[in-house]
């Protein structure tokens, strides 16, 4: 379970080229897009053992020494995992609970960076790679209720760090060697693209996915990933491979990324040709796979109102996720058995992390009017077509929220008055159907009848 949660976190901390291109093409939420993202994360996870093994290969000489060095490296990896696991279990959660009480985004960000650097320093001190420490701390943070806020916090750093990563890789490639090795590098790139395409497509097809989607997933994952660069850099640093072979491998991965971006851009047309499906049927067949009509609700705020809504959704069997910046409420939600996470619903990065544009409904139950307005603005920017239901204190707040883009706003004071009036009418033996129609008419007109009466009473 922790590994799966880490995978979700790693989508942002270790963004791949193909996932960013998928987002630009609007295919991230499609059947082949979701499969490709999931398999990409699994692909990166399978590369983690090489972070431990590769540095050893450059130091040990002879089979006996190699076996001993590998055993020692594995032992260190297990020790590092145990240290980070127990630290994450007994220290990370209390640490972040203490940090969140300060209600400071800057302190939270610094804490995330400090924890990541400390984990990398620990594994480096044990003779393991820095990347292995980053993997471990990502896995531990992915198990906590802070994982979405951590992910959204790291998003602004993502593009900068990814750019620095490629700058570092660029310094490893010798432009002067390319004229002598370009043909071998091109051959290597073709082998990478073709072998990964066929292997991934076959695996997806064997799992029961339609042929068209299988080809599209294969085209998405045919590209050589950033982890390939990282492993080659470690191998060169450890003298596991010679400089010429390293240059050929690095250039091959680089060429495969250029060619892979073209495959991703035209994945539907290429997959349609490979699968023999008619062009008009391609979109329907691909998007039909893995489609889900189940509602997905996001709740902003887990106070009294948010808790009540969560209970109703839970009893109705509707999936939801609630966010709150008060750790006491988050802990109460976990005790209630609900999926309540620490996070600021007004944070645009958090909304992007949880894919608010794919939600069926957003419910804002926060009692802070400025916070609610800011949340509405950010949700509307990220997801213009997702309906929003908001809580309001009075008619004025309700009107402002409706003007900001809320689909429905329910003023607490007026709703309480309506229920009180409905009960009075029931006591006076007015038919229940008439009462319900009367109240619904007031709601349908956005409380305009009540608002008009209130305005008439003003001097």
Image (cartoon, grey):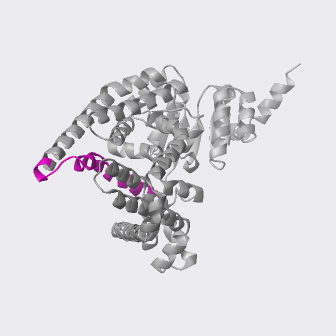
Q: Nearer the viewer, residue 97 or 368?
A: 97
Question: What range is drawn magenta here?
Answer: 37-65
Magenta segment, principal secondary structure? helix
Q: Could you tell me if residue 51 is visible in this image? A: yes
x, y percent for residue 329: 47, 25
State the quadrant of the N terminus: top left
State the quadrant of the C terminus: top right
Q: In this view, does 360 lie above or below 191?
A: above
Q: Does the magenta stretch include residue 39?
A: yes
Quarter holding residue 39: bottom left
Q: Residue at x 48, y 45 (%)?
A: 12
Quarter holding residue 129: top left
Q: Which residue is drawn at 43% across and 20% down?
A: 98
- Is 112 on the left or on the right of 396, as rendered? left
Counting every numbered tag in the picture gives 0
x, y percent for residue 242: 31, 57
Q: Which of 262 and 169 is in front in this view?
A: 169
x, y percent for residue 80: 26, 35
x, y percent for residue 203: 34, 67
Q: Residue at x 50, y 42 (%)?
A: 161
Q: Residue at x 58, y 76 (%)?
A: 280
Q: Nearer the viewer, residue 355 or 235?
A: 235
- Is 73 on the left or on the right of 220, as rendered? left
Q: Is residue 233 above or below residue 427?
A: below
Q: Could you tell me if residue 291 is visible in this image? A: no
Q: Give the residue at the far left of this rendering.
A: 64
Q: Is residue 134 magenta?
A: no
């Amino acid at each position: 379970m922790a590994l799966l949660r880490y995978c979700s976190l790693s989508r942002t901390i270790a963004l791949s080229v193909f996932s960013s291109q998928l987002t630009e093409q609007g295919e991230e939420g499609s059947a082949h897009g979701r499969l490709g993202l999931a398999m990409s994360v699994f692909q990166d996870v399978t590369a983690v053992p090489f972070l431990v093994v590769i540095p050893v290969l450059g130091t040990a000489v002879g089979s006996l020494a190699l076996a001993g060095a590998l055993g020692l490296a594995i032992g260190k990896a297990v020790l590092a995992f145990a240290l980070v696991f127990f630290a994450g279990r007994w220290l990370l959660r209390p640490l972040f609970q203490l940090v969140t009480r300060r209600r400071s985004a800057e302190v939270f960000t610094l804490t995330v960076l400090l924890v990541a650097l400390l984990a990398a320093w620990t594994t480096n001190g044990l003779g393991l790679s820095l990347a292995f420490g980053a993997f471990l701390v990502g896995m531990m943070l992915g198990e906590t209720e802070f994982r979405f806020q951590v992910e959204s916090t790291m998003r602004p750093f993502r593009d900068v760090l990814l750019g620095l990563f490629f700058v570092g890789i660029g310094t490893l490639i010798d432009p002067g060697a390319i004229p002598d090795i370009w043909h071998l590098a091109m051959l290597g790139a073709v082998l990478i693209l073709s072998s990964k395409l066929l292997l991934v497509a076959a695996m997806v097809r064997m799992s029961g996915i339609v042929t068209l989607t299988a080809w599209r997933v294969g085209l998405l994952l045919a590209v050589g990933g950033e982890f390939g660069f990282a492993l080659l850099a470690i191998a060169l640093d450890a003298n596991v491979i010679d400089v010429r072979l390293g240059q050929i491998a690095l250039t091959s991965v680089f060429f495969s990324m250029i060619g892979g971006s073209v495959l991703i851009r035209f994945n539907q047309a290429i997959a349609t040709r490979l699968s023999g499906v008619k062009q008009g049927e391609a979109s329907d067949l691909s998007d039909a796979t893995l489609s889900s009509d189940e509602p997905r609700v996001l709740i902003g705020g887990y106070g009294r109102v948010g808790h009540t809504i969560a209970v109703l959704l839970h009893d109705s069997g509707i999936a939801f996720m609630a966010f709150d910046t008060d750790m006491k409420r988050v802990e109460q939600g976990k005790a209630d058995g609900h999926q309540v996470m620490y996070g600021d619903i007004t944070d645009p990065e958090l909304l992007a992390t949880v894919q608010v544009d794919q939600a069926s409904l957003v419910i804002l139950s926060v009692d802070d009017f400025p916070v609610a307005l800011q949340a509405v603005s950010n949700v509307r920017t990220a997801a213009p077509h997702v309906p929003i239901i908001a809580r309001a204190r009075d008619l004025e707040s309700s009107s402002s929220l409706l003007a900001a883009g809320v689909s429905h706003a329910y003023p607490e004071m007026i709703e309480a008055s309506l229920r009180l009036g409905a009960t009075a009418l029931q006591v006076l033996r007015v038919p229940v159907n008439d009462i319900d129609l009367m109240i619904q008419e007031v709601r349908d007109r956005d409380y305009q009848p009540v608002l008009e009466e209130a305005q008439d009473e003003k001097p």
